[in-house]
Image (cartoon, rainbow, N blue to C red):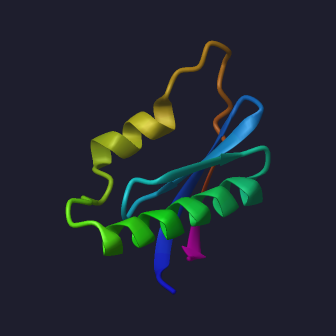
Amino acid sequence: MKFYTVVLRQSQDYWVSLSLENGLVGQGETPQEAIDKLKEAIASFEEASQSENHVYSSPVSIQELHEFLTIEDTEPATEIYELRKVYA
């Protein structure tokens, strides 16, 4: 089980989770659901990277993190963010 740093962002009616180590995301109606979806994405990614040779992963850059946190929605976005550690 590995440790991941996750940024959570509320966007209108849902939450989005972003892993800083690999750029994978999850989405859900609650913060926990978004994290659970991210854990599923991480497990899937790790499985694929073990069975395939051309799977690429890199940490999220500061610019990508800034874009994630400041994405403009059609409706005014809330400015609720969380930073958590997750084991997956």
Q: Is residue 46 above or below residue 34?
A: below
Q: Residue at x 68, y 15 (%)?
A: 75
* Residue 32, horizontal then vertical, whole percent: 75, 60
Q: Residue at x 33, y 72 (%)?
A: 51
Q: Is residue 50 above or below residue 66?
A: below
Q: Residue 15 lies in what quarter of the image? A: top right
Count of numbered marks? 0
Q: Residue 46 lies in what quarter of the image? A: bottom left
* Residue 56, horizontal then vertical, whole percent: 24, 58
Name the foreground residue: 55 vs 51. Answer: 51
Q: Residue furthest bottom?
A: 1
Q: Which residues are magenta?
A: 83-88
* Residue 6, horizontal then vertical, whole percent: 53, 62
Q: Residue at x 52, y 70 (%)?
A: 43
Name the foreground residue: 65 vs 57. Answer: 57
Q: Is residue 46 above or below residue 55?
A: below
- Quarter of the image containing the C terminus? bottom right
